[in-house]
Image: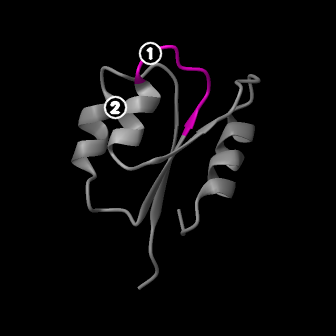
């Protein structure tokens, strides 16, 4: 079976990200979080859960952020 990863695009998600990442614990081989400019503790929460976190400046183009997240993922998505 091929390993599967999760790629998420986030911004200022500190209120929900902890519960979200806790709920998928052990399901994915890798988790990539692409942050588009958070000013809260979103990135620290993602790191706490072992996610690989990358910054991507928001350019009003969801597909650009999505494609960047897929580039960073080392597994199937």
Residue at numbered disc 1: 40
Q: Is residue 3 above or below residue 67?
A: below
Q: Which residues are magenta?
A: 34-41
Residue 22 location in percent, x, y?
Answer: 23, 44
Give me the residue at 69% from left, 56% from top.
71
Mark in front: 2 vs 1: 1
Give me the residue at 26% from left, 61% from top.
26
> What's the colour scheme?
one colour
Q: Residue furthest top?
A: 39
The front one of 24 and 61 is: 24
Marker count (numbered)? 2
Give me the residue at 38% from left, 50% from top.
50
Is 38 one of the magenta-colored residues?
Answer: yes
The front one of 63 and 11 is: 11
The front one of 20 and 53 is: 53
Determine the main secondary structure of the stretch shown in magenta.
Answer: loop
Give me the residue at 71% from left, 26% from top.
57
Residue at numbered disc 2: 17
């Amino acid at each position: 079976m091929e390993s599967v990863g999760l790629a998420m695009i986030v911004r200022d998600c500190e209120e929900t990200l902890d519960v979200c990442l806790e709920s998928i614990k052990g399901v994915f081989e890798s988790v990539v979080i692409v942050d588009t400019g958070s000013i809260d503790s979103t990135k620290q929460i993602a790191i706490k859960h072992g996610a690989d976190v990358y910054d991507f400046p928001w350019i009003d183009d969801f597909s650009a952020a999505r494609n960047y997240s897929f580039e960073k993922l080392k597994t199937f998505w």
